[in-house]
Image: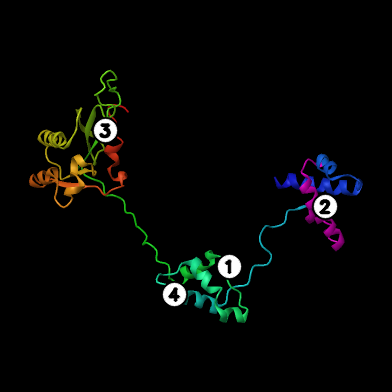
Amino acid sequence: MEVEYVGKRAHLFHLLHQHPDWTLQQYADAVGCSQSMVCTWRQRFRQAEAQGHLDASIFFSHSPAPHHRPPRLEEEVKERIQEIRLNPPEHLKRTPGPVAILYYLHRDQTLLAKGTRLPRSSRTIWRILDDAGLIERDPEHKRSPRQPREPLEEIQMDFKDCSTVPADLHDPDAKRAHVVETCNFVDAGTSILIAAQVHEDFHAETAFQAVVAFLQRYGRPKRLTFDRDPRWVGSAMARDFPSALCQFLYSVGVQPHVLPPRHPELNDLVAYCTPFGR
């Protein structure tokens, strides 16, 4: 792309000397560019001719990097910013943020009398506070891979809709959603679907019966993993007491593993299991 632009600029440079009486639109039509490009590069060519720098470098783009960076802030200003953060002025009964610090900083008579350069962006204030360790950040969460499970060591269970069963549109009292559900049991060690019990009305009692039927047929795993569905863990009103399912699992020697909220990836094997299609 730069090669094409260099060719157009060289063509424009040639036309400016061959046809000095042309209008900006004529130059733009001949080169195939905009009028603003003609104005910009005509001015650059005139500056290069006035300085006597007529070589191939005049056709190349200029670097967008700033040629003169702003001067650094003095240590006195940084110390004053930290002081305002730690000791709020004017009896301010809260920890001042970057915007408030910027407001008080530009009212500091000592710094104004010295003519010291002061920051004008709250982003600069934030960076200074962060470098000084005055911005509290959450600790970095170190994720560790889950250890592989042995076959039948851990079973994941969850409910899934059977989308292949349509709703009864002729009955006004019939269910429109969750017409038929399956309670899936997946082995976490092999990712194999072990059982899928179908029911038209899964609630706390029928879900409990599904778990009992699974244990009677396939035995007791070391751990049974499930999410915070009220049919498993009960309502939030009884959060201080274990649900009937958890009490039953403890009594038969199975460790219930209730997943934390908003972490569906921990129950991924059964969550994406759709044996009946969806």
Q: Which residue is mark 2?
A: 42
Q: Which residue is mark 3?
A: 160
Q: Which element type, helix, strand or loop, lies under badge 4? A: loop
Q: Amino acid at mark 4?
A: Pro
Front of the two marks 3 and 1: 1
Give the CA separation, mark 2 to mark 1.
36 Å
Q: Is residue 222 magenta?
A: no
Query: Looking at the picture, how far across and down is residue 19, in whole percent?
Result: 91, 45
Query: Looking at the picture, how far across and down is residue 87, in whole percent?
Result: 43, 77
| Magenta residue span | 31-58
User: Residue visible at 24% across and 27% down?
Assistant: 180
* Front position in the image: 64 or 76: 76
**In terms of sequence position, does the residue under pointer 4 or pointer 3 come before the other?**
4
User: Residue visible at 87% across and 44% down?
Assistant: 23
Image quadrant where one finds the C terminus: top left
Give the CA separation, mark 4 to mark 3.
56 Å
User: Residue visible at 19% across and 32% down?
Assistant: 202
